[in-house]
Image (cartoon, helix red, strand yellow):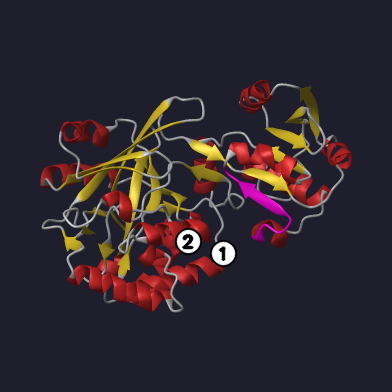
Amino acid sequence: MEILPIKAIVYNQDKVNIKDVIAPPYDVIDKNYQNNLYERSAYNIVRLILSKALDPYKDAKESFNTWQSEEILTNLKEPAIFYIVQKYKNEKGKLITRKGFIARNKIEDFSTKKVLPHEYTMSGPKKDRLDLVEATGAFFSQIFMVYDDKTMKIEKMAQKYLTQKPFIDVKDDLDVQNLVYIIDNKDDIKLIQETLKDKTLLIADGHHRYETSMNYSKLHPDNNAAKYVMSYFTNASDDNLIIYPTHRIIEKNIDEKEILKKVEKYYNIETLTSKDEFLEKIELENQKQITTGLILKNDDNFYVLKLKKDANKTIDTPEVLKNLDLVVLHELILKKELGYSQDELMTQNGIKYEKKENVAFNSIKEGASACFIMAYPKMKDILEISNQGFRMPQKSTYFYPKLLSGIVINPLNR
């Protein structure tokens, strides 16, 4: 994969407090949070990535141009790669330190197998992001890419930067500390380029934005900068890269005893009374066979669902997908037994996909009929499915922490 440094635009920290102007990706910002970010600063990046104006794209263009003329946004003197260390505590209080870097990569069609998608996309978000980049001529957020380098060359090289004062040191609203270091040394940039030269990239997050960059590149064949997209790269061989599950909340009014009866056709069921034991059991059993958790309305028990032998053989899908817990759940339970259509699953009609474990558990107290608690996804499954040219169901994976918008902007006019 061809990697280039970014001829970057960044916030002028002499004029703004970086904490006041950063934001998460646009697709996780609801209306209330959008208002909160608006109030936080007249220069918050949300005004570019998710404007509240009647014509949001025109407004984003005008704000972007104005902020540059006011030197709220400035140009870095040299093309650079941005090394990022993100520190946070998981739900059990363990400190996780995820490392990666932001650079540009050559936009490749999926047919080349140099960039692999793993989830399906929808047309609406792609049009929205294309309209934004057409208006502003810039990428404000990164694609989340995963590569695999067991030698950890980049991480070893970057150790020397971690002793320096970071370019940015900011905690986001989820208490994730983001430390950003600028790499503009030509030898260090070359090491990064050489390390990724023969690597395949997996899109972990940002499928819509990557496909938008592909479309923009085709629409502007004479713009060399448009042949590249800004991405964040992290190493699959780093134990700190953790993939979180996305749980399925059943919002249709279905009798809980009926759900249990339908599930029993395909899964052996173990009943537990301890939530902690339930969560541990799901992960333990999922190492041996497809295992999912189930909680029901008006029921204090926790159900560990272990797929019966050959229960997935009847699913009309490629063999590699039959061994994925979400595909089994979608095809056998949600579609076949609970009557969801593919369109309902895609648009989350009568079903909700929830990343936060506590929200998933509380859902049945708030009126949901049931909630399927998913095991942590395995990187080897994602890579195997993607390498064979297939994609997982929508919202299969959740790579946390999210990458901040506002760390670096990639203009497409230079």
| Residue 310 lies in quadrant | top right
**Which dot marks residue 122?**
1
Identify which residue is drawn at 80% across, 28% down: 268
Amino acid at the residue labelled 2: His
The first of marks 1 and 2 along the sequence is 1
In this picture, residue 135 sits left or right of residue 274: left
Q: Are marks 1 and 2 in contact (CB under 8 Å)?
A: yes
Q: Position of residue 136 (x, y in %)?
A: 32, 73
Image coords of residue 316 (percent x, y): 74, 50
Q: Residues within 10 Å of mark 1 (few under 14, many from 20)?
A: few
Name the residue tied to disc 2.
Answer: 208
| Residue 203 falls inside the magenta stretch | no
Label 1's element?
Answer: loop
- Disc 1 marks a residue whose amino acid type is Met
Q: Is residue 354 magenta?
A: yes
The part of the chain drawn in magenta is: 347-355
Q: Can you see residue 398?
A: yes
Q: Residue at x 65, y 59 (%)?
A: 346
Q: Nearer the viewer, residue 249 or 241?
A: 249
> What is the x, y in percent for residue 26?
45, 59
Number of marks drawn:
2
For the residue pair 322 and 132, the one nearer the viewer reads as 132
Query: From this viewpoint, is residue 108 visible?
Result: no
Please say if 339 is above or below 92. Answer: below
Cα distance, mark 1 to mark 2?
8 Å
Q: Residue at left 55%, top 69%? A: 123
